[in-house]
Structures are given as structure tokens and as C-alpha cells.
Image: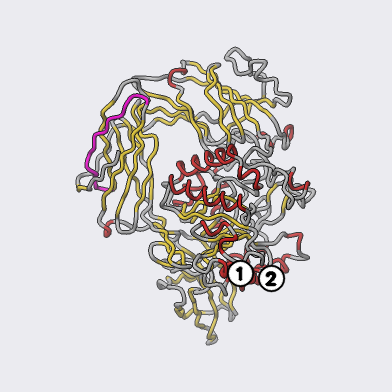
Amino acid sequence: MRLICLLICMPFLLFGQRKNDHSLNSEWRFAADPVKVGEQEHWQDTAFASGSFDEVKVPHCFSTDPRYFFYTGTAWYFKQFTSSVSGDEHVFLRFDAIFYQSKVWLNGVLLGTHEGGYTPFEFDVTTLLKTRNTLAVQVDNSWDTTTIPGAKTYAPYSSAAQRQVFPWINYGGITRPVHLISKPAVHISNTKITATPDGAVHIKAFVRNSGKTPANVKLNVNVLKYKFSSYEVKVAAGASETVELSGTLPAAEINLWSPDAPNLYTAIISCGKDTVQPRFGFRKVELRGTKLLLNGEPIKMGGCNRPLDYPGYGSMDPQEVLEKDLTMIKSAGMELSRISHYPVSEALLDWADEHGLLIIEEAGNWQMTGKQMNDTSMRRKYQSQLREMMERDWNHPCVIAYSVGNEFQSQSEEGKSWVRDMSAYVKTLDNTRLITFASMLLGHEELTKAEDEASQYVDFVSANIYSNHLKVLQHIHQLYPDKPVYVSEFGIRTDAVKSEEERIAHLQKAMEDFRKCDYLIGASVWTFNDYFSRFPGTNPNGYRPWGLVEPDRTPRGMYLAWQEEFAPATIELIKNNGDHANIRITARKDFPAYTMKGYRLTCNGTSYTLNTLHPGESMLIDIPLVGATADITLIKPGGYTIMQKTLK
């Protein structure tokens, strides 16, 4: 069902009622089940006495408990809670993520199962709820050759050691929040909003009728002081309908979303008794030749990969850790990131929306073999996890692209088929974002034409490059002269060099190479932080020391060097007149390069507002000197200090 509606101006109204979201976090009971006796001994039954098990707080990662340190296998969680259902309410039990496989019972009744460690799922529990309830959840963090992510099947190019281990730690548990959500029988199950710089708004509302009788309900939408024309939709019992509405707000009344101006809006969408309030931003991401444009302006930006790993928390992402990490990322000019190999928490994307980060999302396929990529079951599992990620995240303006994998054999027929088919699948769900994947093979000289490799099927090329940066980039450009290139990984381990100074020199040489490639749109360092792993080459302390920061987030010298290298401007002292000097600020036009608007410079304690500087433009500031030196900081909108140095 499709309806195109116009917008009419009217006073702001709020329709219906908001959904009731009740947290089921905090106190649970937990037990490991290494010999898998729980189900046969009926741990899932309401009569089972779980009170003697350990008390834990959910979200919970059992892998970080010293008693279960990196335990792999089955474990159980138990929760007692009270509830009530009134009127035509339906109640849904939602898990934001459980790693990796789960099986859920409520009051002794099996609700269902789920596979995938980073995406949400829910069950309608209306008919099973009682005044007092027992929730039992069986989890299993085991990986094998049939899981995503997981181990590899046999392949001649992969060593036996690499096939039987995993790239990062399989942190197990209910690692993200649990909710009990009340909704009217007829409710909005999801929305998809597209909003562009000309003020055009397109809203797709997914209306579900969980009741036993057909229903006629009105759909209403408000954005700012504007209201979409009402529309009545008929939804059969147990069915869903999709309604699409479009209109245009006056361009003069909206502010665009960008990393330096992350302006957000709220749509008030009501359907009968139900109301949802999704946030969105007005922005447009597009490609023009080898350029990446945001709101019509070319951008080239640095970024990072952030493995989800923190001492004591494992793969949980508590708000204090999240804010610390993302503030450090933002303060180092890392604005465009292939942030993880798997779906991140929604809290991370909320922060990125609010503070301005551009994210390339990725779901699984870490070095899958040809046999795995050809397997119908594996494809379905991947598509399920990809769909759950996309349907959760497609309203976030920070998400600009989807990646369909990392470091698989993209030159093989299986790899090319994977990218072709998964790109087509992505477009059936969301055709408003770009598509890519991270290749590790594009430096191979035997690749001589675009048809030799799977990047022919994506919007921009992503490449993991750890040496010969310029040579590899030039080869990629020869293969795909009309596509932008993104360096999805580059970096060097702390223990691969004799000193941090040598590591910094490696970075600076890479950046010199990047600045020679006009077709380069971004580069994402591997990695922001050190992370635990079992992969060959991991240090005896369990860490892979690639990070700009240590596990506890203490900055290394590389972090400070990265700040200056990823800053969008150069700053130099060009004339010293004794007690005064001229400082020249130049917006880079090589890499990174984007328009600087709303930036400030402080020098010896005095603040100066910079002009809007487009790439290549400069301005001079006359400043007083203290002892013939100038201590300067460059501050971007939002108050982030992205460069600190002393000029002499």
C-alpha cells in the first residue's frame, strides 16, 4: 500500500500514547552449563529453583568473570519479574543482543531461538504473561564453521592454525539490554525515514495488527510545526501494512546534518493509540566520479576501526566507556569510520548522530571461504543478521554505507557471486545508502581488469593496506578508475617496531602516500584500541597491540600524531615580529579535506574564531607571543580539541 501525502501547516500536536518500555536489566541469576544438562533437567521450568545460582547484572558478559574466563559453551540466565496487561495491549520481550545463539522460555513455554551475536530480536509474550513471571534464557557462545562469525572450512590458501581459531574473543552472555515493551494491538512496528537537503521527507511506516480482529486506524505525522495529511489504513488481524508518505518542509526552516553540525529532528508518528518518535537528519550522501559528497560538498576524512573490547566489560559497551572512546575518536579527527566488523550497539549510533560521526556498518563475513559463501544456509544466516542490523539502523543519519564483508577471497567466483548477490539484497531493504566491502587482495598484480575482482559490484572500493600504500592505491585506481577508494584498514603494531617514534614515522609515510591520491575518500586506522584475541600472532598477555590507545585507553604517541595528521588544517608560524607573529591556517586540499565552518583557534590563552575555510583556503591571524613561542589548539564545533602544538 502506498500513499503520497502533502504537508500542511498547523499547530504542533501529539497523538495517542507513547510505548511503555520497561527495563528487564539489573539482577538476574546465572549458571554455566558445560555438560549441557540444563534443558534435560528442566532448568527452563517455572518450578526450577535458580535462587542458588550466582546473581549478576544484565547486560552481562560471563567471559570476563575470572571463574569463566573465556569459557566457551552453554550458560543460563534466569529472571523473576512482575507484570500486568490491560485493554488491547500487546507486550513484546526484546533482547538488544545475546552472543551468540539463544533459546528463550517464559513461564516454562519456549518462545523461540535466535542466532547472531550483535543484533536485536523480540517475541510477543502477551498471552503468556502472569502477575509473577519466570524468564529462562539459554545462551551458547560457541563458534564453528557454520556460525557467522566463525572458523573457516578448509581452504588451500589458509593455514591450519588460522582455520581453527577466531579473529576476536567470543565474549558470551546477554551483552546488551533487555526490554519488556507494551504496545497497542495495532501499532507501528518500525519506520524508515529519508530526508534530503531540499526539505523533502519520505516516511515509510510499518503498521502491524497483533490483535484477533481487523482494524481501521488513522496514520498521522508531525515534523516541526508541520502535519502530514491523515490517512486511514485497514489492517487485517495478524497482518501488517506498509504506508508511505512524502512531503516537503521549507528548506529555510531546516538545518542540515553533518559531522560539524549534527542537527537532528523528531518525527511524531501516530497510528490509532500508538505513537513513535524516531529521530532523523536532513542530509544527502552521494558519489560523483571518484568524489564522495555530503550535502553537495566533497569530503575526505580519516577514521578508525574500534574492536568492541574493554578490560572487565568484554564486548559490553556501557555508556561511560562508549562516551570516553567516541570522544577520543572525535577529538582525533576520525570522522569517517568502518567502525567494526559486526553491528555496533544502537547507543553508539545514537552518539554518532548527536555528535557527528560518519559510519560504515558491517555485518559478518570475516574471511569466509568459498565453500561457506556458496552454502545456502550460511547465506540465509548472513542475510538474517544483515537485515536485523539494517532495519534497526536505517534512520540513523550517521550511517552512510553498508559493508558486505571483510577479507574474503574476492577474486574467486564465490567471492564475486557473494558481493553481487548481497549488494542486490541490501538494495531491496535500503537503496538510500552506499555499498562496499573490505578487500585484502587489491594489491595483487595478477588482477588486471575490473572483472577479476568483486569490487566491480560496489559503489566505492574499500581496501585493507598494510604496506606499499601508494603502489597498491595506484593499482586499485587502474582497476577501478571511476570509483572512489577508501582505505578500510591501515596501521602497524606496537611490537612490530623498535619504538613509538618508528611507528609514527610509518604512519606519516602512509599519510604522504594518501595525499598523492585524489580519488581517496577516507582511511580508517587499524585500530583505535588494543583487543583480546586467540588469533595466531597474539601476544602472551592475550592482546593484539595495534591500538592508538592502550587497553585502558591511555593514549600512545601514535594517538597524538594521528590528531595532527587527521586534522583538516595545517598551522604554521610565518612571521615573527618579536612580541607578535602571524599564524597561517590552511584548510587541507589533499587529505583529509573538507570545509571548515565554526572552528576556533586558541593561542597562548586567547581564542580566535576562524573564517569558513574551503579546502585550499587560508587565513592569517596576528597573535601576541609569550617567550617567542605560540601554544596553539585547534577546536572543532562541539568543543573537540583536534590539534595541539607549539610553534616557534
In this rendered view, identify the residue nearer to me: 619 or 425. Answer: 425
In this rendered view, identify the residue nearer to me: 218 or 541. Answer: 218
Considering every residue shown, the one lying at the far right of the view is 540
Spatial separation of the CA atoms under disc 2 and disc 1: 24 Å
Give residue 275's position: percent from left, percent from top. Answer: 33, 35
Q: Residue at x 54, y 45 (%)?
A: 344
- Secondary structure beneath label 1: helix
The colour style of the image is secondary structure
Please state the total of marks drawn on the protein image: 2
Q: Which residue is mark 2?
A: 505
- Secondary structure beneath label 2: helix
Q: Which residue is mark 1?
A: 475
Q: Earlier in the sequence, mark 2 or mark 1?
A: 1
Give the amino acid type for the residue marked by disc 2 in the picture: Ala
Give residue 50's position: percent from left, percent from top. Answer: 63, 18
- The answer to whether residue 524 shows anywhere in this view is no
Kindly indicate whether the residue at mark 1 contacts the one at mark 2 (C-beta within 8 angstroms): no
Give residue 114's position: percent from left, percent from top. Answer: 56, 31
Q: Seen in the image, is 177 located left or right of residue 411? A: left
What mark, if any, has residue 147 been given in the picture? Answer: none
Q: Seen in the image, is 514 located left or right of residue 9? A: right
Task: Give the number of the mark in front: 2 or 1.
Answer: 1
| Segment colored magenta | 224-238
In this rendered view, identify the residue nearer to me: 428 or 352. Answer: 428
- The answer to whether residue 5 shows anywhere in this view is yes
